[in-house]
Amino acid sequence: MSTTLPINFDTRPLIPFAHDYSHGESEPWHQHSCAQLLYSLSGVVSIHTAQGSWIIPPSRGVWLPAGIAHQLTITGKVAARTLFVDPFARADLPTVCQVVQVSPLLRELIITALDLPERYAANSRAERVYELILDEIRGMSILPFNLPEPVSPALKNLCVLVRNDLAKPWTTSEAATLLNLSERTLLRHFRQEIGFSFSEWVRRAKLMESLKRLAQGQSVLRVALDLGYESQSAFSTMFRRRLGMPPSHYFHLS
């Protein structure tokens, strides 16, 4: 059972909030009566919902619509900056959970908003900053850092097995055999429930786990081998393809 946390938007369309977390901290299941953009300046935040899990690497954010029950776990030292957004502030705000790219402009606007007054005059600088933030939220790019949760018990159990043994070279053929299904049937069910293939789900699970391990200071080689890659080079190639830079640079440059 989750707690609903109400927020008052009588004086402004969004409320900025800053909070720093230590490694290993967590927040219990709760939900907000408003939308939320959680942005991480450092460290990694894991968001868990009934629909799946999301990983927020440094300099990225997660959008949570109003009423979505969620839980947070923290890896590394996290400097979190949050915007609580009135769900009626704009008609076209995102309606689903998603990890997003926070632009340099939006990042600076979030930091600026922390010092703005709660009450402000029409056509003031504060009003323009708030309105520009809402404009930037609508243009955020979606990133593939989510791991949807299957609905059917059989696929749920399969995903638990994968998460518990990410070093194993999971194949669609082996997964289908475990469930007594044909590969074609497994792929069809996976796409119906998840939206993409079993192989892609495994790749995302490994990527999300690697982000948490790297945030803890584990070496790239150790992470690569623990997650079943044949070499550090193979892991780095995957990481660069997904995130645009090698793992050895990612947390230093974020």
Image: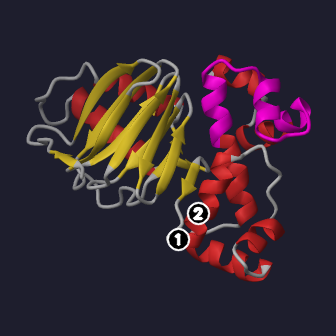
How packed is label 1: few (under 14 Cα within 10 Å), some, or many (20 or more)?
Answer: few
Which of the two residues, 9 or 55, is positioned nearer the viewer here? Answer: 55
Q: Residue at x 78, y 73 (%)?
A: 177
Give how far across and how far down residue 245 sits, in percent: 76, 31
Give how far across and how far down residue 92 sits, in percent: 35, 60
Which of the two residues, 173 or 144, is positioned nearer the viewer here? Answer: 173
Q: Is residue 162 left or right of residue 51?
A: right
Give how far across and how far down residue 136 sits, in percent: 43, 43
Q: Residue at x 51, y 21 (%)?
A: 42
Whether residues under marks 2 and 1 lie with C-beta atoms below 8 angstroms apart, the answer is yes
Amino acid residing under circle 1:
Pro
Q: Is residue 175 visible?
A: yes
Quarter that holds the C terminus: top right
Q: Which residue is under mark 2?
A: 157
Q: Where 170 sits versus 16, above or below? A: below
Amino acid residing under circle 2:
Asn
Q: Where 53 sits versus 177, above or below? A: above
What range of the chain is rendered magenta?
A: 208-236
Q: Which of the labelled discs sits on residue 231, or is there none?
A: none
- Assign a secondary structure to mark 2: helix
What secondary structure is the magenta-colored segment mainly? helix
Q: Is residue 32 left or right of residue 37?
A: left
Q: Which residue is under mark 1?
A: 153
